[in-house]
Image: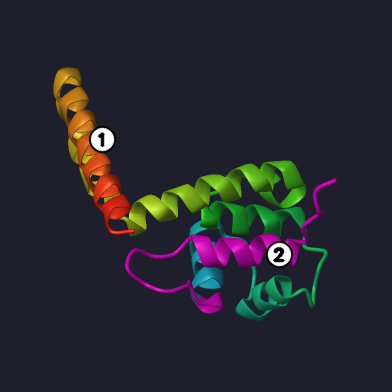
Amino acid sequence: MPREFSIADKLDRLFKQVRPAGQGEFSYMAVAEAIRADQGIQISHTYIWQLRTGRRDNPTVQHLRGLATFFGVPVAYFLDDDEARKIDDQLALLRTLRDAQVTEIALRAADVSPSSRNTIGELVRKVWELERDRAKGNE
């Protein structure tokens, strides 16, 4: 049976996975200020820190909703471990794509014809094969 995750585990993963472009983690202060300003939910940076570190572990649905909205995940992320696992996998993939600078290629490819997208896909596959073959040759 898969291990259950605490609110602290889930919130910690969100802080680690969801980041401003080209920067480190959001600060507790930035998260609290954004939730208050954008959603009108009263929450402090200290309370967010307490939730992330497990010092507090029974947040209100309103606070969970505020955190979920801020990090761009459904509130079910905090309530359902299976949903959290799926979302964590998606966030990891997105981060990998962003870190690999694939996003720019994908966004540019979205604005070309289907035929050109197929050509781009084929070129990427060929480059990947060349790189893979080179790596095998260096072993």
Q: Quadrant of the N terminus?
A: top right
Farthest bottom residue in view: 46
> With respect to residue 127, does 26 lie above or below?
below
Q: Out of 34 and 4, give the one closest to the viewer.
A: 4
Q: Amino acid at mark 1?
A: Arg
Question: In terms of sequence position, does the residue under pointer 1 or pointer 2 come before the other?
Answer: 2
Residue 118, placed above or below residue 23? above
Q: Which residues are magenta?
A: 1-29
Q: Residue at x 65, y 52 (%)?
A: 65
The residue singled out by tag 2 in the image is 9
- Residue drawn at (72%, 76%), measured in percent from left and top? 53
Residue 120 placement (x, y as % from top left): 18, 32
Give me the C-alpha separation between circle 1 and circle 2. Answer: 37 Å
Give coordinates of residue 25: x percent, y percent: 47, 72
**Regarding mark 2 in the picture, which secondary structure is present there?**
helix
Which residue appears at 77% of the width and 73% of the height? 54
Q: Is residue 22 left or right of residue 104?
A: right
Coordinates of residue 17 in the picture (x, y in percent)? 51, 61
Is residue 22 within the magenta segment?
Answer: yes
Give the amino acid at mark 2. Asp
